[in-house]
Amino acid sequence: MKNYYTKTMEEKIKILSLLSLFFIVSFSIISVTPCDIFVENAYADNDNENDDDGNDNNNGNDGNDSNSITENENEGTHYPGWACLDCHKNGTAASEERFGIGGTVYTASNGVTPVQGATVTVRSSAGQTYSMTTDSKGNFYSKTIPSGTLTISIAKGTASASMVTQQSNGNCNTSSCHASGSSIGRVFLSSGTNTTTVTNTTTTTTNVTSTGTTSLGYNPDIKAILDAKCILCHTAGGARSQSPLTTYAEAAQYATGGANSLLVTRTQSGGLMSAYLTTAEAASIRSWIVDNNVAQNTTTSTTVSSGTGRVNGTIDTDILTLSWDAVAGAASYGMYAGLTSGSYGATRISLGSGTSKAIDLSNVPAGTYYLKLVSISSGGVETAGFAEKTITRTGVPTGFTASLNGTTATFSWTGVSGASGYLLNYGLSSGFWLGTVNAGTATSFTINTSNIPRGTYYLAISAYNSDGTTAKSSVQTLLVQ
């Protein structure tokens, strides 16, 4: 009896041990992180096909996919704006499927409101075509692994947008591309309605035609710059199709506001479009708007009466850009400068043979300067054919501070003599500025940050007057959470 009991107990112990091992292994197999569970629920495979069995028609990378594919697998309604392929690249967990492309579409580049129901079309250099539809959070993705470089376009209703350059990376929301706060901004599809407030619906097109002057007009000067540098994006079907710049009327609507117009603030140093323009091109756009009343056509006079030739000058940071009327027969031009009207130094500054010149003022103190331009013949004879030009260089604001209390950001600084107002410059680094906010004549103001995307912002103050804008103050950072 004892032997039978002992044997029976040993067998029970063995059975219990096996059962314990079974439960441990079972729980180990089904144990996943909360993220894994979320991904499984969000990306359930509903196509009833084995994605990699060689027979599917719409996903997988098994070599038997059709070259024209319509994806119907946008169940991924989580983490809008995240870089999808950071997780879904060869699968960082067993439950996470591999994606070939993924991203999020918004109504604007700030990435606040998603676009649902937009068609995202991807074409690869290998001849594949992928079509996806954005879900309720604006997300789209495809499990098809692309070959070659990609060209992407988005459409919904009458609105459309296309990527300017081809890409080999399908991780659209990655930090180097369409991440929050990036220089490119979020993938977005505007309804096509211009959201910029235009106060003047009729633009005055009277040209400057007074004797002895040269006006700067849209045709042909500004149009040549916009055609060469801007309309690749700012045209129908372009990445910035919601703000076209292909005609005079289109360009003129963004010139409303003079020095504070969108075309000026976006094209000058630190503006979103400044990186695509030369200093001279940016100065020409500003002069067209500020000095030439958004003239539609350029008019030129080659005969300049003595003492009446016009000289234009604008200061941008530390650069003074001068432009002047051409003089018939002139081989080159020069300039004298002084601190008193009518009294100039003996040194003549060479301006070259053109009709514009950029001059570095980084070593020139703040103050008012009087400039006298002369034309020079091929024999070296000077002709004082220009009126005196006065330029006031304003000092850079000091003592700039930035602080955040809840959702209220407060900025303050010490004002400078000669300033007509101040601009708050903001960006994602001290060397990359996204735009400006006009603070007016005050030396402090506040901003509500409730609708500002979270992140670290770099800020600086610059002063401006009728002659231009100063360099930026010391840089402060502000963390918006």
Image: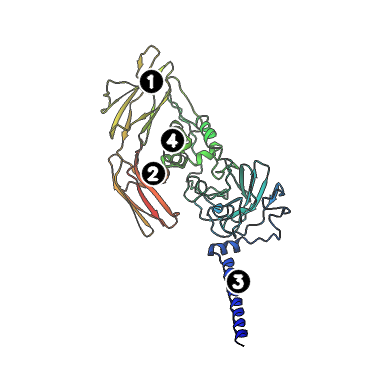
* Residue 231 image offset from top left, x and y in percent: 55, 37
Cα–Cα gap, marks 3 and 2 = 60 Å
Q: How is the image coloured?
A: rainbow
Residue matched to label 3: 22
In this rendering, which labeled residue sits more in front, label 1 or label 3?
3
Residue matched to label 2: 430
Residue matched to label 1: 333
Residue appearing at x 54%, y 34% in the figure: 227
The residue closer to the viewer here, 62 or 192, is 62
Q: Within 10 Å of the Cα at label 1, are there few (<14), some (14-19), or many (20+) other Cα atoms?
A: many
Quadrant of the image containing the N terminus: bottom right
**Whether label 1 touches label 3, CB < 8 Å:** no
Could you tell which of marks 3 and 4 lies nearer the N-terminus?
Answer: 3
For badge 1, the amino acid type reads: Tyr
In this rendering, which labeled residue sits more in front, label 3 or label 2?
3
Looking at the image, residue 96 sits to the left or right of residue 376; the answer is right
Could you tell which of marks 4 and 2 lies nearer the N-terminus?
Answer: 4
For badge 4, the amino acid type reads: Arg
